[in-house]
Image: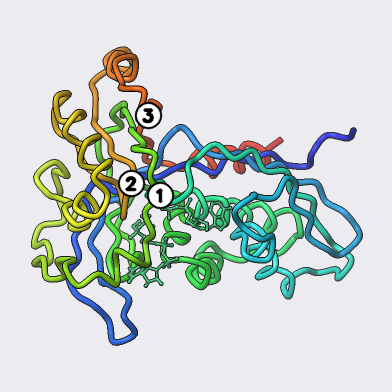
Amino acid sequence: MSQPDLILPAPAKLNLFLHITGQRDDGYHLLETLFQFLSVGDTLAFSRTNTGDIQLTPGLPQVADEDNLIVKAARALLPYRLHTQAGIKIELTKRLPMGGGLGGGSSDAATTLLALNALWDIHLPLEKLAAIGLELGADVPIFVHGFAALARGVGEQLTPMHPEESWYFIVHPNVEVSTAQIFTHPNLPRNTAPLKDPQINWADHHNDCENLVKSLHPQVALAHNWLLEYGASRMTGTGACLFAPFTSKEAAQHALNNMPASFTGFIAQGLNTSPAHLALNAALVN
Ligand SMILES: C[C@@](CO)(OP(=O)(O)O)[C@H](O)COP(=O)(O)OP(=O)(O)OC[C@H]1O[C@@H](n2ccc(N)nc2=O)[C@H](O)[C@@H]1O
Ligand SMILES: Nc1ncnc2c1ncn2[C@@H]1O[C@H](COP(=O)(O)OP(=O)(O)O)[C@@H](O)[C@H]1O
């Protein structure tokens, strides 16, 4: 077996807070949310082919290949290839839970855009790559740009931020939350006042989806009640995962060791630069 041409991580993200400040005419919600990357994520290995097509191995059992955000991202770049016979084989190592609010699908899509932009000699600027990504999902641009940021609009207007790179304990209550269901629910709060000062201590803010998700999914409320014993903790995105910050890896590991068997969890470090960008830059230099 020959070695892949490029191996890149697709990191998870946390929404350290998530305010909903309004709704657009097309139904999409206006957000103010602070994104930070995590040191844990999926891994994608890319091998160039000259068959002109896109192969994904293994696919995801729950998602048809044509709906997989990896395949959709690769397809979106087909028109920009210099050579129509340029193809790609992508091997996916999936670690992130789906529908967990950790952005795994969006991150996989962004990593694919970054990789093929290089491997297919496309070299679009990141701004253009992020615009292509936004068509695939509201969270794709933050992963394409690769810096921790306060996101406004539907997640595409980014102001770089530098939250503390804490260790986190992330708890998955083992339920999957549908983003579309939360955003169409009548009880979702939609009128949090926009922040006046972008210098943010994230712990002072909140996640507008949290109470609704906990009322619809009691397992999330149970997990949160347990995690609150370890201090400030919060839901990420539209759930279901919850996170709590720790000052050391050991303290986060201690909480993980005490976790009830009905939940799953992991520890990870918060990162203000995406490991996908660090790995891509390192590969391009070598
Ligand atoms: C709210 C966030 C915060 O990170 O939640 P998570 O999905 O990560 O939990 C994201 O922006 C989600 O982004 P993403 O998961 O890419 O959403 P999309 O595929 O674009 O949209 C899924 C559905 O959610 C709704 N949606 C999404 C984003 C948004 N700002 N307003 C919305 O109303 C739309 O109804 C859309 O049909
Ligand atoms: N490569 C992928 N990885 C994960 N989910 C994907 C992927 N491609 C498409 N999806 C779809 O996107 C949905 C949201 O996935 P994900 O990004 O992991 O969750 P979240 O948006 O809650 O963080 C999944 O339930 C799945 O149907």
Report which residue position mark 3 lands on: 269
Residue depicted at x 40% and y 27%:
266
- Asked whether the residues under the numbered discs 2 and 1 touch, taking CB atoms below 8 Å apart as contact, a structural biologist would say yes
Q: Does the Cβ of the disc 1 residue fall within 8 Å of ligand 2?
A: yes
The CA distance from mark 2 to mark 1 is 6 Å
Report which residue position mark 1 lands on: 176
Report which residue position mark 2 lands on: 240
> Based on the displayed image, in which of its 4 quarters is residue 247 positioned?
top left
Mark nearer the N terminus (1 vs 3)? 1
Residue depicted at x 27% and y 41%:
219
The CA distance from mark 3 to mark 2 is 19 Å
Give x and y (percent) for residue 202. Answer: 17, 44
Amino acid type of the residue tagged 3 in the rendering: Gln
Mark nearer the N terminus (3 vs 2)? 2
User: 115 above or below 77?
Assistant: above
Position of 264 compared to 74: left or right?
left
